[in-house]
Amino acid sequence: MFNERRVVARVLDGDFHAFGELVDQYERLVFHVVSRLVSQREDCEDLCQDVFVKVHQSLPKFAFGSKLSTWIARIAYLTAVDHTKKTGKNRLAVYPNDLENFHFTTENPAQLVSRKDYQIYLESLIAQLPEKFRIVITLYHLDEFTLKEIEAITAIPEGTLKSYLYRARKLLKEQLEKQLQINWYDHWE
């Protein structure tokens, strides 16, 4: 079992193997956070490495005021946001202001989805959400952070996060029901 306090203490004592354990434990989380904001594979990989460099450099300042995963996710989020601001590259080019008229891909889901590809299809729908919805639904449902933890990661107020989560679910529900003729919303509550 991963004991974050013990691993952090070992890293601070110069144990590089312990830092490898830390990376192994959180690399999926970092990739999820970064990849929701940055679409270029090479940029995403570079940023994930940058995140762990920042984690290693900042670890002496970490005082366990939050869970280690929340702290690392915040570093990943801020690193990805900073990258998108500097480069002007965003996951998707432009998002509509009027979300009522937001349209997903018109590709036939029968071509995209087989029984074991539902997750891939759902991921493709999530990737098409506006950034603010995409990051919240990923952190909440895929990485299983609480709203308080997501607030700590993104600095978005909890009430706004609830609204984003509701709207993201609604967009996904509508698209899934329309394209797949099923009611998946019950699985998200």
Image (spheres, rainbow, N blue to C red):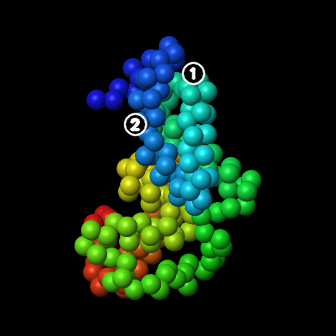
Out of 100 and 102, give the one closest to the viewer: 102
Q: Which mark is residue 158?
A: none
Disc 2 or 1, which lies upstream in sequence? Answer: 2
Mark 1: which secondary structure? helix
Q: Which residue is mark 1?
A: 60
Q: Is 153 situated above or below 4? A: below
Q: CA distance from mark 2 to mark 1?
A: 19 Å
Horizontal arrangement in the rendering, residue 40 relative to residue 72 (left or right): right
- The x and y percentages for residue 5 are 41, 23
Q: Residue at x 49, y 81 (%)?
A: 105
Please state which amino acid type lies under the numbered disc 2: Gln
Out of 75 and 34, give the one closest to the viewer: 34
Q: Residue at x 33, y 76 (%)?
A: 113
Out of 82 and 70, give the one closest to the viewer: 82
In which quadrant is the C terminus drawn? bottom left
Horizontal arrangement in the rendering, residue 110 relative to residue 163 (left or right): left
Q: Quadrant of residue 91?
A: bottom right
In which quadrant is the N terminus drawn? top left
Q: Which residue is mark 2?
A: 25
Mark 2: which secondary structure? helix
- The x and y percentages for residue 9 are 45, 17
Q: Residues within 10 Å of mark 1 (few under 14, many from 20)?
A: few
Q: Quadrant of residue 118?
A: bottom left
Q: Residue at x 73, y 56 (%)?
A: 87
Q: Residues within 10 Å of mark 2 (few under 14, many from 20)?
A: some
- The x and y percentages for residue 12 are 52, 17
Please state which amino acid type lies under the numbered disc 1: Pro
Q: Is 89 situated above or below 12? A: below
**Would you say residue 159 is visible in this rendering?**
no
Q: Is 81 situated above or below 7? A: below
